[in-house]
Every structure is written in C-alpha cells, then in structure tokens.
C-alpha cells in the first residue's frame, strides 16, 4: 500500500520533526514519516520512546521545537484550528463527559463540530449501533466498563469523519477480551478506508493491526516497514531462548561460537536469546554445546521471529524495558 508515489495519497507527513523539553530532554529527534491514506500505521516502542510526544505534535497538543508536520494537507503548527477539523483523537486517559449519558456524549460532540441537530442525533444512534453500545445509550459513563468506554471514545473521535484517527496506546489497561473487541472495531474502520495512526508498546497489537509501522526509541526512528518486512530483516528463521544458572555472558559466547547457524546472540535479563538461520537439529546442538562447556540449561523455548526480536536486534534490549 505504501509508500505512495502520489503526494495526494499521503495524509500525514513529518519533516525533521523534533521536540526538546526543558533541560535538554530530546523526546523526538528529527523524525521523518509519511503515512498513506487508508492505512493503519503504528508507532511501536517502549514507554518513553517518544510515541506520545509524536502523536501530541501531530494533533496540536504539543508544539514542536523544530521541523514540520502536515495532517490532511494542513500544517498543524501554522493552522492548529484547521488541523483539529481533520483529525480525531483518542488519548490515553478518558475524556468522556461523566455528566452526560453515553448517547449525549456523541450527540454534543457532533453539535460542537457543526452538525445539525437531526444529523447529530442520527449519527450518534448509528455509531452506538456500530460500536455495540446501543443497549447502553441512556446509561451514565460511570456504568461503562473500560473496554466500552474506550469504544465510545473511538466512536466520538470519528463522528465528524476526520481524515485521520489518532489513538494513543488504545488498549493499555484493557483485559484481553476488551482488547480483541477493540481490534475488531479498528479492523472494520480500516476496511471502510479510515486512516489510523496508533501508538503502542504491545508487539502483538502492532503485528495484528498495522499495515506498516515505525519502531522508535529515544525519539529516533530505528526501522520502518510492514510487520513481515521487519521480521524478515532479522535474517533468522528461529529464535531460541535459553535459561541457565551461572555466567550467562559466558554461555552467550560459547553458544555464539559453537552452535551452527547462529546469526546473533543477545543477553536479555536472565536469558540468552539466539537468532538462528535454519531449524534442523538446533535443539540438540544447543544442549550439546551448553553441556560441553559445563552449563545445565534450566529452560529452553523456540519461536519464530517477532517484532520484539527486531527491537532487540536494533537496541540490544527488551521492548518491555
């Protein structure tokens, strides 16, 4: 789907976008991105990577130190009021009006964005049905579960039909069932052509939802591509994670030297992770090499490369750190 050859297909563009907070804290460092119409684009990285600050600059809530940001053809710094007309935002914390009912939260949002009373009523009712909240229409916000409240926030954010929907850590704090329900909703919006930019530190979420994603850390872009492209970039077919008592750095060294097909070895917390090309005979080889050097393995796991593998290869640390 991307990158687009036609500039008209690019909905979000950043050029050397930078944010430096007081004290010289560089939250976002010269970020160049292009997000195309109709795609779900993810910013993936650990807490503190600069994801929320990036989303804040794109949605007018944070003023960049330097660089440029365009959303829907609007310069968000030069024309913040116009930019707000073409974006929908779902922040990390709830901004629902607790003095209003579920339906009223949508109705008054539509009126605020210039909808007629009749149109706002019709859209509020339609969206509650689409987001599986019709039976909660007259209830207060306090009666909603976390997952329901998050779905209502998404419904409200798209009510004025923005060019781009921004979601900042949309499933943080949700239980697995609510997370999957929200994924389904976002998938439906994607099918309908809605452009979505989301920030997340959940690799499964990025892999499940995103057409393309940018992996960022310390405010810098580390990698960009589809989930499959990024995983293939590891050059490994298999990820072997081993645990053992003793000197794990020494274990990592001997496994890297003596296990056939090893591409890279990383020490991650209390484990050693091997990126291996090929799978035939890998487990017996790992056990044999460890035993030969006096290491008794206490645990061993085998998996395919993931986006977390990509992050570890780029940074040498776990995505959850």
Image (cartoon, rainbow, N blue to C red):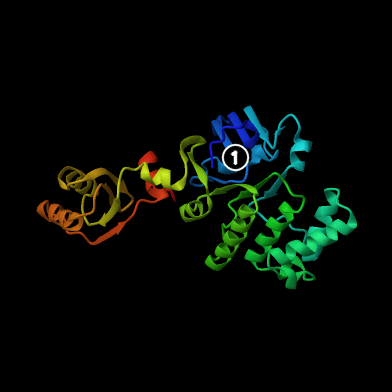
- Residue 284 shows up from this direction: yes
Which residue is at 17% across, 48% downward? Answer: 259
Query: Which residue lies at the image location 62% right of the left edge and 50% below the top edge?
Result: 167
Residue extending farthest right: 117
**Above-or-below relation of 290 to 263:** below
* Residue 24 found in image quarter: top right
Mark 1, other Cα within 10 Å: few <14 / some 14–19 / many ≥20: many
Of the pair 109 and 19, the residue shown nearer to us = 109
Q: Position of residue 290 (x, y in %)?
A: 15, 53
Image: 137 above or below 84: below
Secondary structure beneath dot 1 equals: strand
Residue 197: x and y in percent read 60, 46
Instruction: Pick the quarter of the image with the N terminus.
Output: top right
Q: Nearer the viewer, residue 19 or 240?
A: 240
Q: Where residue 157 sits: x, y (%)?
A: 72, 52
* Residue sitting nearer the eye, 9 or 184: 9
Percent of width and height locating residue 281: 17, 56
Q: Is residue 18 above or below residue 92?
A: above
Q: Which residue is mark 1?
A: 36
Q: Is residue 37 left or right of residue 143?
A: left
């Amino acid at each position: 789907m991307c990158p687009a050859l036609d500039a008209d297909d690019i909905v979000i563009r950043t050029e050397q976008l930078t944010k430096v907070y007081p004290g010289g804290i560089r939250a976002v460092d010269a970020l160049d991105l292009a997000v195309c119409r109709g795609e779900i684009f993810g910013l993936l990285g650990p807490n503190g990577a600069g994801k929320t600050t990036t989303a804040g600059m794109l949605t007018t809530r944070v003023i960049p130190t330097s660089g440029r940001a365009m959303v829907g053809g609007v310069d968000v710094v030069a024309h913040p009021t116009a930019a707000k007309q073409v974006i929908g935002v779902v922040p990390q914390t709830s901004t629902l009006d607790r003095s209003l009912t579920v339906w009223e939260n949508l109705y008054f949002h539509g009126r605020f964005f210039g909808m007629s009373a009749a149109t706002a009523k019709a859209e509020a009712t339609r969206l509650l049905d689409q987001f599986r909240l019709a039976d909660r229409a007259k209830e207060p916000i306090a009666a909603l579960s976390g997952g329901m409240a998050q779905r209502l926030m998404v419904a409200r954010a798209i009510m004025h039909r923005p060019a781009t929907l921004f979601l900042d850590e949309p499933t943080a704090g949700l239980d697995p069932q609510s997370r999957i329900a929200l994924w389904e909703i976002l998938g439906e919006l994607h099918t309908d052509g809605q452009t979505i930019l989301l920030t997340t530190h959940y690799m499964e979420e990025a892999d499940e939802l995103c057409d393309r994603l940018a992996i960022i850390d310390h405010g810098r872009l580390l990698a960009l591509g589809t989930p499959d492209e990024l995983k293939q970039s590891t050059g490994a077919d298999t990820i072997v994670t081993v645990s053992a008592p003793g000197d794990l750095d020494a274990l990592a060294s001997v496994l890297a030297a003596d296990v056939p097909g090893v591409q890279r070895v990383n020490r991650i917390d209390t484990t050693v992770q091997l990126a291996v090309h090929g799978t035939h005979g890998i487990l017996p080889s790992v056990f044999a090499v460890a035993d030969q050097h006096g290491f008794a393995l206490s645990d061993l796991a085998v998996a395919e490369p993931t986006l977390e593998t990509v992050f570890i290869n780029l940074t040498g640390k776990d995505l959850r750190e």
